[in-house]
């Protein structure tokens, strides 16, 4: 269905239909106004825009013979203009529901940005962004809509309240990119800054990750499934990089420098960090105070201070999250209560592992170079639909998750000190099943869990009894 709202206005820049003389002048007036905006002049109000249009029309009528003698610039011929309350979109994409709905969707984003960043929408009702959505950037350059002062960019670029986006391969990702650059524009113009690069890109990615249901846009969703987020791929970036031994620690993500690090994978890392801090109920309230710091020269120190005593735990939370990240992540059940283990008693240790939770401390510290035997037993539920699936610690081999049978008992020796530790201990868990031997390279606490997707823990139930015994 069309999501285009009647309050939006569509007009055509010169050349599209090739017969409108007034439109030709209108187009040039808009081009000049747009070029002027790139020098970061204050946004022109609706009344101001109307004035430009009227002046354009009067000039067009008065000088029509002169105008007719001039051909319109080649680039402007195929550029359409779509206008809504908060967006003027200039695009060379053909008319269609996905593209023509963008201005109205941008208007839906505005109050959500205001609410998230604590901005009064009534005070900024005339906030307006000019965006070029470009299939062929040369057209925009020829029309004076993409000045040489805009640096080369791969996907999108925001400067003050002007935005440029290259067209994208899916309707989802086209909207996503416009909302990403729109978030930058909103913060630049209404907050006065964007904070450190990890936050600027993380928050832009966070707000741009959206759902669209029956024409209703919702910013800042944690994706439930890959299907609705075509070409987005942020979760896959983090999961793949971590599994390949290229995990980024929390301090490393916060040191993100786009000039040195580039963009692609980093949009995944920055989104994931912002998503963890915003969607984990334990950190949300502090994270939502970060916008107050965007103009601070001591931004990162300010962020650390906001989290207070929680800050030292976040590097460890981040390691777990980036190693287990997946769609529809259940933050509450995946939360880890870190508890350093004690050396194993002579007669071993008995612990219980809940099937419906993420990693759980065994309370046992394993020493580097020594061998330990783990034996597990119990019967627990790993799914409810279409019927209850019972499972034992060996797992069920008719369904796999991340290369291991669903429900199999996994173990990790967590060395600790995630701030200093460049490797991610959680990235390569050891399958223990009904029993196994662990011989850690480094001393650390044994953590245990059953193998299941982070969105599928709620329908699990039951306990596993685990016995840990000492050197063989
Ligand atoms: Zn960006």
Image (cartoon, helix red, strand yellow):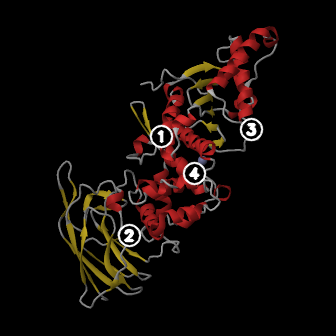
Sequence-earlier tag: 3 or 1:
3
The C terminus: image quadrant? bottom left
Task: Please provide percent x and percent y for residue 365.
Answer: 36, 82
Queried on whether the Cβ of the residue with tag 2 lies below 8 angstroms from ligand 1, the answer reads: no
Residue placed at 70% from the left, 18% from the top? 26
Q: Are marks 1 and 2 in contact (CB under 8 Å)?
A: no
> In this figure, which residue is indicated by the disc labeled 2?
429
Question: Where on the picture, by quarter, is residue 441?
Answer: bottom left
**Which-is-in-front pick, marks 1 and 2?**
1
Residue 382 visible to an observer of this rendering? yes
Q: Position of residue 124 (x, y in %)?
A: 57, 36
Considering depth in this image, is 438 or 153 the residue closer to the camera? Answer: 153
Crowd rating for badge 4 (residues with CA inside 10 Å; few <14, some 14–19, many 20+): many
Q: Is residue 41 above or below residue 390?
A: above
Residue pushed farthest bottom?
346
Count of marks placed on residues: 4
Question: N-terminal of the two: label 1 or label 2?
Answer: 1
Label 4 lies in ligand 1 vicinity (Cβ under 8 Å): yes
Q: Are marks 3 and 2 in contact (CB under 8 Å)?
A: no
Disc nearest the viewer among 4 and 2: 4
Q: CA distance from mark 3 to mark 2?
A: 53 Å
Left or right, 348 with respect to 414, comes to: left
Give the residue number, with chain letter if any, for mark 4: 201
Foreground residue among 52 and 143: 52
Secondary structure, mark 2, is loop
- The N terminus appears in which quarter of the rendering? top left
Q: Earlier in the sequence, mark 1 or mark 4?
A: 1
Q: Position of residue 278 (x, y in %)?
A: 45, 54
In this rendering, does residue 272 appear at all? Answer: no
Q: Which mark is residue 39?
A: 3
Q: Secondary structure at mark 4?
A: helix
């Amino acid at each position: 269905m069309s999501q285009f709202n009647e309050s939006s206005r569509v007009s055509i820049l010169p050349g599209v239909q090739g017969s409108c003389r007034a439109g030709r002048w209108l187009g040039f007036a808009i081009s000049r106004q747009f070029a002027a905006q790139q020098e970061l002049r204050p946004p022109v109000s609706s009344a101001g825009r109307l004035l430009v249009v009227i002046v354009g029309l009067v000039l067009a009528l008065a000088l029509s013979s002169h105008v007719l003698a001039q051909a319109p610039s080649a680039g402007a011929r195929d550029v359409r203009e779509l206008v809504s309350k908060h967006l003027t979109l200039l695009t060379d994409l053909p008319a269609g529901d996905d593209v023509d709905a963008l201005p109205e969707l941008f208007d839906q984003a505005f109050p959500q940005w205001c609410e998230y960043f604590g901005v009064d929408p009534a005070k900024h009702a005339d906030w307006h962004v000019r965006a070029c959505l470009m299939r062929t950037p040369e057209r925009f350059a020829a029309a004076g809509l993409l000045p040489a002062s805009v640096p080369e960019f791969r996907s999108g670029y925001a400067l003050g309240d002007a935005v440029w986006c290259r067209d994208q391969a899916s309707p989802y990702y086209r909207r996503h990119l416009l909302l990403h650059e729109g978030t930058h524009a909103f913060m630049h113009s209404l907050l006065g800054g964007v904070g450190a690069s990890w936050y600027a890109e993380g928050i832009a990615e966070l707000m741009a990750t959206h759902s669209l249901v029956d024409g209703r846009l919702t910013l800042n969703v944690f994706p439930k499934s890959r299907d609705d987020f075509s070409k987005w791929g942020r979760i896959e970036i983090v999961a793949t990089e971590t599994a390949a031994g290229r995990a980024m620690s929390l301090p490393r993500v916060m040191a993100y420098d786009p000039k040195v690090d580039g963009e692609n994978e980093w949009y995944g890392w920055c989104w994931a960090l912002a998503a963890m801090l915003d969607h984990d109920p334990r950190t949300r309230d502090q994270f939502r105070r970060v916008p107050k710091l965007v103009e601070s020269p001591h931004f990162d120190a300010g962020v650390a201070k906001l989290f207070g005593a929680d800050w030292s735990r976040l590097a460890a939370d981040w390691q777990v999250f980036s190693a287990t990240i997946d769609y529809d992540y259940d933050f509450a059940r995946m939360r880890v209560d870190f508890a350093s283990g004690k050396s194993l008693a002579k007669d071993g240790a008995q612990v219980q592992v809940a099937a419906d939770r993420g990693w759980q401390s065994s309370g046992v510290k394993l020493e580097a170079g020594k061998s330990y035997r783990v034996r597990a037993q119990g019967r627990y539920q790993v799914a409810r639909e279409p019927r209850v699936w019972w499972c034992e610690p060996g797992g069920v081999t008719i369904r796999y998750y991340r290369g291991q049978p669903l429900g199999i008992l996994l173990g990790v020796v967590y060395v600790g000190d995630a701030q200093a530790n460049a490797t991610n201990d959680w990235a390569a868990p050891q399958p223990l099943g009904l029993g196994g031997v662990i011989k850690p390279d480094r001393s650390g606490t044994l953590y245990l869990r059953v193998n299941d997707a982070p969105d599928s823990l709620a329908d699990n139930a039951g306990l596993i009894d685990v016995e840990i015994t000492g050197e063989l």
